[in-house]
Image: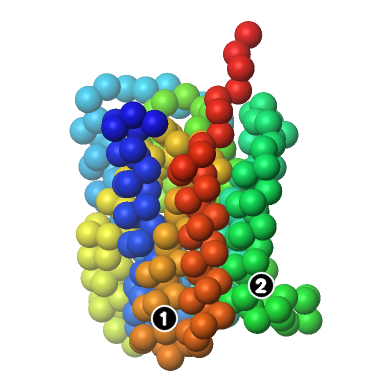
Amino acid sequence: MNKSSYLPVWIAFVCALFWGLWWLPVRVLESSGLNGVWAGTALNAGALPLLLVLFFIRPKRRRIDLRVIASGALIGGAMMLYSAAITETTVVRAVLLFYLAPAWAIGIEWLFMGRRLRWINGLAFGLAAAGVMLIFRGEISLSHWNSGDLMALVSGICWAVGCALIFTGPDIGARTLGLFGCAGGLVIGTALAVGSGQGLPAPADPIEPAIRALGIGILYIAPMLVATLWSARRLPPTLLSFLLTGEIISGIATSAIFLAEPFDWPELAGSALVICAALTEVVSPAPKPATA
């Protein structure tokens, strides 16, 4: 990589640290009366006004096709499933199950993008798997799973597929991608909430969660989403997925401090292994597939 190539790498990693704090606004809105999927849906709604403004002031029009719409829906769906997951399971479990996404990304690049598997891919996957085993203390059988665990796992799959579509699709700009992702998340979140029988939320003071969602959406969700998608357009899905494991650092650390979730040597060692797996993709990125 040259120096300019490292910019999306660093942006993706910094964004990951901020995404690790995603559970904080979700729990804040949950305490205001927006439970389950509604908290994440409200955050997307709060980010929508700024993303609409950025969309309409973009310097030039870009073509939009079905692949872009699908990528936005998948990214939005990943965000919604992850938001719901951290209300149904521990933050530690949600973060680690979501970050099996690099495994799905390797498979996607191998099957559909002409990537050749190398020994270092096996090393990265082995390190990540060992990290998950440590953090779960070996208890990863289906009998220990709940609905939150399943949603976290599926959210990682949606994220990996969505990033692959972004990387291989037309360049429509991060702001437009952010708008599609946010709108997709809003629609999917509402559908998930209604489909699961949660019904419309009725907080005692609806103004408070609305103001909180708007503020968090504008100051936190929208900028992080646009910056992450800007990197997604420039980085292979596997590299991006591994870089975003930086979320583990801030997510597990803050949940241990504020939620008193377990954080002992297995969590510390497991997180270090997953981060080392990420570094293998940074140090030795996959070569671009040959073109005819």
Question: Which of pointers 1 and 2 lies earlier in the amino acid sequence?
Answer: 2
- Would you identify the image quadrant in which residue 230 lies? top left
The correct choice, above or below, for 156 with respect to 232 in the image is: below
The residue depicted at 47 percent of the width and 24 percent of the height is: 170
Q: Mark 1–mark 2 contact, CB under 8 Å?
A: no
Left or right: residue 206 versus residue 59 is: right
Q: Which mark is residue 45?
A: none
Left or right: residue 35 versus residue 216 is: right
Q: Secondary structure at mark 2?
A: helix
The residue depicted at 41 percent of the width and 68 percent of the height is: 249
Label 1 is placed on what type of residue? Ser
How far apart marks 1 and 2 lie (CA) works out to 19 Å
The residue depicted at 37 percent of the width and 43 percent of the height is: 9
x and y percentages locating residue 241 in the rendered image: 51, 49
x and y percentages locating residue 198 in the rendered image: 57, 76
Visual colour scheme: rainbow
x and y percentages locating residue 130 in the rendered image: 65, 66
Disc 1 target residue: 255
The correct choice, above or below, for 76 with respect to 130 in the image is: above
Label 2 is placed on what type of residue? Met
- The quarter of the picture where the C terminus appears is top right
**Is residue 115 at least partly visible in the picture?**
yes
x and y percentages locating residue 144 in the rendered image: 73, 82
The residue depicted at 26 percent of the width and 72 percent of the height is: 212
**Is residue 189 at least partly visible in the picture?**
no
Q: Secondary structure at mark 1?
A: helix
Q: Which residue is at the front of the view, 154 or 259?
A: 259
- The quarter of the picture where the N terminus appears is top left
Disc 2 target residue: 133
Left or right: residue 288 versus residue 11 is: right
Q: Residues within 10 Å of mark 2 (few under 14, many from 20)?
A: some
